[in-house]
Amino acid sequence: MGLPQDLSSSDEAVVSESKMRFRIAIIGGGLGGLALAIGLVQRGIPVQVYEGASGWTDAGAGLVFAKNAMAAMEKVSPDIYNAFQKRSSGQGWESKKTTYMDYRDGRTDGELVTSVICANTGQESVHRTLFAKDLVALLPEGTFHMGKRLVGLDNGPNGGYTMRFADGQSIDADIVVGSDGIKSKCRQLLLGEDSPEAIPKFAGEFAYRGMVPMERAVAVLGDEFARNSMVNMDSGCLTTTYPVEKGTLLNLVACRSLEKWDHEDWVVPSSKEAVQKEFAGCGPVMQKVISMMDKPSMWALFDHPECSTFYKGRFALIGDAAHASTPHQGAGCGQAFEDAHVLCSLLADEHVVSLEHVEDAFAAYDAIRRPRTLKVIHTSRENGEICMMRGESTGDDLGKIKANLDQRFHWIWHEDLDQQVQEARTKLHEFSGSRPAKETLVDGS
């Protein structure tokens, strides 16, 4: 795979021979990890990706993206952004192209509370699994391995690692990046399996999910409500719908608050009757959304609200493994692409010429990315409370809800990504300034 012509000049420097010999392993096929892999490969740094699942599933269904997420993926690789554009869906009506989401009063027949505007981009959405497959196709043959579930990580020679997989195979690496999702084994190994921070926290809600052909959605909801993204808000519950796959499908989500999750599994079977009972007191538009949930399951919502570090040594976390959040700001996946942008830029930096400098790069990544991503987690929970009409400062006051929604996303969307990378590089240079430059430390050579 060649280097794209329009990668930023700061990442076009010739990669040192020692960096080309780094053995980098990415654990998990999360979108952030795949983006990092693509970005590194296209900058001349080889990687191997090990995904635990033996095959693809539809878990996660639809994902939404806004301005910052799309900018980040393009900065990592224009090829990623092009793949995204080929698959993504925006608002169905031209008049709503700059709208991120319509927020509606779910107690009524869809009365509009506010249209949140994300100028120039609006909102775009994709089918998660299909997009992940598109990204895998951008990697060189022999780079992506399925059926490789990590069960252990041992310290190896020269500060490296020996990865142990469930199939009995052991593989050595100099650098390991965990991109294995909210149930991350890498997170447990990095933070300690008994650490409270290693365990996902129940977020006080669960969701039903579904996806239906757009023709059916239009017949049930009408053209405007089916072809454009919306959140219907009610007391203790909400529904979210948005088009995916170039508007051929409508993604459905219905969330309800729940004090405690008593099931061992995170996903448990339900029934159409049970879902209708759960949302029986809601308005007609929410009832119509619920009516399309044909084979519902209850999905418990968990997140990772605390994390004292995203790295140790030459072992780091990215994406949901580092900072899984609830879906209420549509920002979680975008943060994974921001992770990839920053980490890719750091590992490709001309100052990273030895494996010791990789530790400095991870320290800089942690210093810049961890505060922002943890803020996203906490504000996402907060927005769920607001949209379920039980926010601490908003309650069920539609005026206060509108005022909050109209401004709450700006700090996420309008982040200066180049400045974020520059701050990370400044940190890297500070951390590595006291280290002597070495051309290679791989395998002790």
Image (cartoon, rainbow, N blue to C red):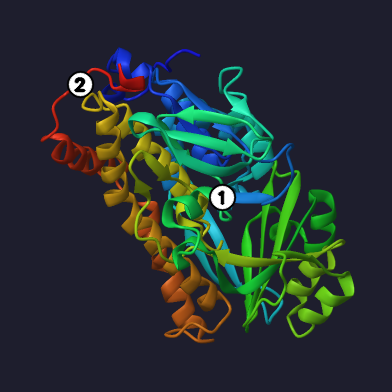
The residue carrying mark 2 is: 438
The vertical placement of 209 against 338, above or below, is below
**Residue closer to the observer: 251 or 52:** 52
Residue plotted at (48% across, 61% down) = 198
Residue 141, picture quadrant:
top right
For mark 1, what is the residue?
181
Q: x, y percentage for residue 72?
A: 41, 39
**Residue at horizontal 43 percent and vertical 18 percent from the top:** 4
Residue 188 in the image: above or below residue 177: below
Q: Inspect this view and state whether residue 66 appears.
A: no
Instruction: Check disc 1 and give the amino acid type.
Output: Gly
Q: Residue at x 72, y 59 (%)?
A: 252
Q: Residues within 10 Å of mark 2 (few under 14, many from 20)?
A: few
x%, y% of residue 187? Answer: 48, 52
Q: Quadrant of residue 148?
A: top right
- Horizontal side of 328 relative to 173 (left or right) equals right
- Mark 1 vs 2, N-terminal side: 1
Mark 2 belongs to which amino acid?
Answer: Lys
Q: Position of residue 142 (x, y in %)?
A: 60, 19
Asked where in the image residue 87 lies, by quadrant, the reply is top right
Left or right of residue 216: residue 135 = left
Residue 366 is at least partly visible in this image:
yes
Q: CA distance from mark 1 to mark 2?
A: 34 Å
User: Which one is closest to the eye, mark 1 or mark 2?
Assistant: 2
As rendered, which of 92 and 365 lies closer to the eye? 365
Q: In what quadrant of the picture does the C terminus appear?
A: top left
